[in-house]
Amino acid sequence: MSFERIYIFDTTLRDGEQSPGISLNPFEKLEIAEQLARLGVDVIEAGFPVSSPGDFEGVQKIARGVSGVIVCALARAIENDVRTAWEAIREAEKPRIHTFISTSDVHLEHQLRKSRAEVLEAAKKMVALAASLCQDVEFSAMDATRSDPDFLAQVLAVAVQEGARTINIPDTVGYAIPSEFGNFILGQYDRAPALKDVAVSVHCHNDLGLAVANSLAAIEAGATQIECAINGLGERAGNASLEEIVMILETRHADLGRVTGVNTTEITRTSRLVSQLTGYDVQPNKAIVGRNAFAHESGIHQDGVLKERTTYEIMSAATVGRGQSDIVLGKHSGRHALANAMEELGYKLSADELNQAFLHFKQIADRKKQVTAVDLEHLVSEEVRVQSDIFELESYEVTSGSGKIPSTRVTIVKDGETLPGSSESGGSMESIFKAIDNAVGTKGKLKDYQVRSVTEGKDSLGEVRVVVDVGGKPFAGMALSVDVVEASAKAYVRALNNAYRTGAVS
Ligand SMILES: [Zn+2]
């Protein structure tokens, strides 16, 4: 039996990055893209270059730095978008331009204010323009599922005729249900026979919790590309979850007859990295990547699994890369051991990066007996963030005790300039955040504050996540330290760095 190949189009860095509160800097995007390449996705949608200079830079970095995978940039069906997308990806080994326009009457009337004829014309011209710049062009009909099927088929046929090699039929608003969506795709194959000559793709949103089910229905109707995101990130309720789609096809491949190119043992690490860098936690009972996805709590289940794993497990944890690495380093481990461990984890560090990581590793190892693979992964993602920061916490000092008002002094460095700050107020965390505001000259409002331990044990690394409102916009920051006060201060500074990048802080 030969299995049909399903292409995995990852949009974590584009649709996922559009989730509220997520703001990845170009280095973080590159780090995630490198991991997506290791995971073995077929296409990385790296961003929407025309949307901001930072996004352009992130896409360009990925195009230049990540090989072995198609690097795709999004563009509305507007000449400047298409040309800007091409500028950002032209140096990629395998570039793809992804251009889109809405086809539903509700979007045409209220958002685009264009007639059907104008939409058809724009799709025709912009696919042709994209195809003149780039061999690999994808076209999406936004809000396809709420479009008149005949008009949609007409637009898709024109896109194929003008050179699109992949045609994406998105359920933009997450309204479809599986049986209906499968038939909708079959209907498009009937109405636009040219679709048989290209790859048909779907992009499903999870507003009704059906993104994965709808994607699967589309596969059974003939779609060969699935757009999805790690941890199901994306606008509103998110996109189809990459790990779920891949593991459905993997676990049930004998029945479904489809395969992907994904190396499933990289799934867990990818999920963790994305969660760390975006600040979006994974719910504990999330399929495949949730903390409890492979935990058996009931006595009957535990008993069964101990006797024979398959009694209650349909997949083994090892298939998705869980609980495999037993790397443990300590304070006597040297630079070489760190480099080896990093390589085993899939990170190739330059000499500079290794020096930085080693300094940081030593600080952790001084305070923590065992440095595990999870700690090291956190450490690497931490290093990546720091590279593009403008503000850096140099030192802090908090004096507090029962019945005393805490007083805090901090020193922030900006472009080599030292900015002192101080505060005397409320709780000790509030006091340190106010001292940082005082040094930087901002008035941040703390919207969310979370602390958790990364690993087990009293000497565990503490991870602090904050969301700070600056000028009416939320900015997230995350930092790690064995000391929670230090992690909190660093997380706050990180959020201000994110605010600085968008111009909310000067
Ligand atoms: Zn979307």
Image: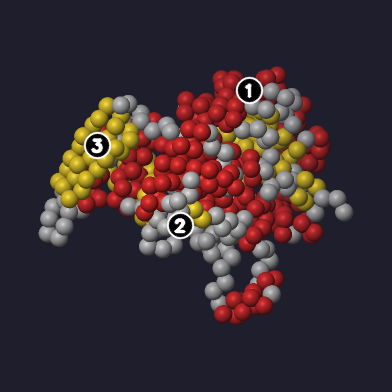
Question: With respect to residue 17, does 427 lie above or below?
Answer: below
Pinpoint residue 481: horizontal percent, then vertical percent.
Answer: 37, 50
Q: Crowdedness of circle 2 by 10 Å Cα count: few (<14), some, many (20+)?
A: some
The answer for how far apart the CA atoms under marks 3 and 2 are is 31 Å
Residue with the mark numbered 3 = 411
Residue with the mark numbered 1 = 90
Quadrant containing the C terminus is: top left
Q: Amino acid at mark 3?
A: Thr
The image's mark for residue 370 is: 2
* Residue 363 shows in this picture: yes
Question: With respect to residue 488, does 369 lie above or below?
Answer: below
Q: Are marks 3 and 2 in contact (CB under 8 Å)?
A: no
Pinpoint residue 258: horizontal percent, then vertical percent.
Answer: 77, 51
The answer for how far apart the CA atoms under marks 1 and 3 are is 43 Å
Q: Earlier in the sequence, mark 1 or mark 3?
A: 1
Question: With respect to residue 299, does 267 lie above or below?
Answer: above
Foreground: 427 or 443? 427
The answer for how far apart the CA atoms under marks 1 and 2 are is 45 Å
Q: Crowdedness of circle 3 by 10 Å Cα count: few (<14), some, many (20+)?
A: many
Pinpoint residue 350: horizontal percent, then vertical percent.
Answer: 53, 34
Q: Specify whether 221 is left or right of 22.
A: right
Q: Earlier in the sequence, mark 3 or mark 2?
A: 2
Q: Residue at x 50, y 48 (%)?
A: 377
Which mark's residue is nearer the viewer, 3 or 2?
2
Q: Residue at x 64, y 27 (%)?
A: 92
Foreground: 459 or 266? 459
